[in-house]
Amino acid sequence: MNRVVIATLLLVWASTLFAADAHYLMRVDGLACPYCAYGVEKKLKQIDGVTSVDIDLDNGVVTVFVREGVSLSEPDMRKLFNEAGFTYRSMAIVSN
């Protein structure tokens, strides 16, 4: 019985690990405090398909993880960050 449970848990873990086919790294200027980061994170999580967001305040890097098949466009991200009061610099797609 324990082997079946362990095997099931491993399958679930592996499927979630490889579910997202890409994530995005965005360079943004002006993110200076956790409150700023929270506001940006909240806006990004409203986008259908975004699974998680990680913000590195020290380096001005926003990492956005998406579900398989979801893509983010550079013009949309530029608009989102500019409307939030930050300077969008660039975006790179990182494939798993």
Image (cartoon, helix red, strand yellow):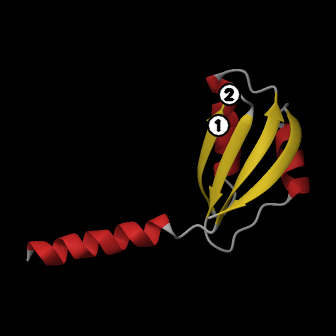
Q: Residue at left 75%, top 66%? A: 71
Residue 85, quarter of the rendered image: top right
Task: Identify which residue is drawn at 64% across, 37% down.
Answer: 55
Side of 12 where 62 appears, left or right: right
Image location of residue 78, percent across then percent down: 89, 47
Q: Residue at x 62, y 64 (%)?
A: 96
Q: Position of residue 27 (x, y in %)?
A: 80, 39
Q: Residue 60 appears at what percent x and percent y?
A: 75, 31
> What residue sits right under mark 1 in the picture?
55
What's under tag 1, amino acid-wise?
Ile
Q: Nearer the viewer, residue 3 or 81?
A: 3
Q: Quadrant of the N terminus?
A: bottom left
Note whether 2 is above or below 25 in the view shown.
below
* Secondary structure of residue under mark 1: strand
Amino acid type indicated by mark 2: Leu
Q: Does residue 6 appear to the left or right of 27 in the view shown?
A: left
* Label 2: few (<14), some (14–19) or many (≥20) C-alpha neighbours in 10 Å: some
Residue at position x 62%, y 56% in the image = 65
The label shown at residue 29 is none
Q: Disc 2, disc 1: CB below 8 Å?
A: yes
In depth, the one of 18 and 72 nearer the eye is 18
- Residue at the disc numbered 2: 57
Residue 13 pos. (x, y %): 37, 66
Position of residue 6 relative to residue 85, above or below, is below
Question: Disc 2 versus disc 1: distance between alpha carbons?
Answer: 6 Å
Residue lying at the far top in this picture: please name it: 33
